[in-house]
Image: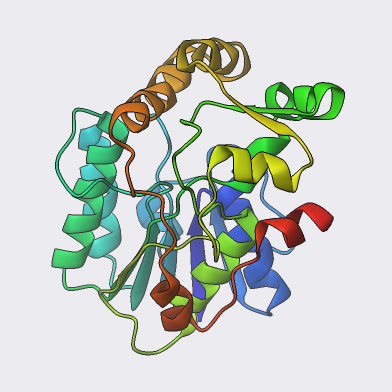
Amino acid sequence: MTILVMGATGAQGGAVARRLVAEGHSVRGFGRSGEVPAGVEPVTGPLEAALDGVSHVSLVLPMLLERAEVDRWVEIVAGSGVRRVVFNTANRIPPAATDVALFESRRAASDALLASGVPTVVLRPPVYLDNLRAPWVAGRLAAERVLSYPLPADLPVAWISHDDLAAATVAALTRDGLEDDVLDIGGPASLTGPQLAAAFGATYEAQDVAAFQEGLTHAFGPEVASVVAATYHWLAKHGGDLYETDPTAAERLGIRFTPVHEWIAA
């Protein structure tokens, strides 16, 4: 079994690639830079060549991939003859259509893969705990004991780590009986902002999304910042129960998601 990890040069794909290598799998990593984790065979393209000889695919789409390119990637993967695809949408997907490009491109890719005839598992995570290590979050947390994040204080979130995403992806790639499942993965408890902050011994502040976008612009450029901020603007108005925990996902995958207090202690 040879597994292609698409996005292996990034934080999410990199975590998946490291986990697969640690468990003894043959792993090929697809990414623009080719700077993949140790033990991973780097592949920079074209995608058709990267898929040659591959049996399983872990797929996460680049943030700024245009909709036409999303469709092309899905078509290439679906037509490659692989035995299973695990698609990480990198966010939950609202039940009804939105005007947020990131949500809708992932919805379209998910629907296309599930309809392609290739055995597919779709993993839909909420927000990553690893985001809290970003300097603009960790700095105030350390200096002022204030956890500032651009989500409403009363929005419940089943926060998940990149390591747990990796565990879920490996299970989805290798466990029998998951074909065509759509799983809302996440931590075992849904925490509001103040509950999350209390786990750090801090208070919570719902950061203004515009200020968050400005920080992202300095770090990643205006295009990425705009795309990401659009999801947070939507969540501020419509988040509801989108990020709630779903215990059936862990049961289906046969894994245990890490509680927030354990992640903090580690």
**Residue drawn at (51%, 26%) of the image:** 150
Q: Nearer the viewer, residue 40 or 126?
A: 126
**Residue drawn at (50%, 68%) of the image:** 169
Q: Nearer the viewer, residue 81 or 234?
A: 234
Quadrant in the rendering for residue 131: top right
Q: Nearer the viewer, residue 21 or 244?
A: 244
Quadrant of the rendering where the C terminus is positioned: bottom right
**Residue drawn at (16%, 73%) of the image:** 117
Quadrant in the rendering for residue 105: top left
Quadrant in the rendering for residue 70: top left
Q: Position of residue 69 (x, y in %)?
A: 26, 37
Horizontal relation, residue 199 to residue 78: left or right? right
**Residue drawn at (43%, 48%) of the image:** 90
Q: Position of residue 35 (x, y in %)?
A: 67, 44
Q: Is residue 59 visible?
A: yes
Image position of 38 with respect to 225: above or below: below
Q: Nearer the viewer, residue 140 or 229?
A: 140
The type of colouring in the image is rainbow
Q: Position of residue 223 (x, y in %)?
A: 42, 16
Image position of 265 with respect to 73: above or below: below
Q: Is residue 54 visible?
A: no
Image position of 82 with respect to 147: above or below: below
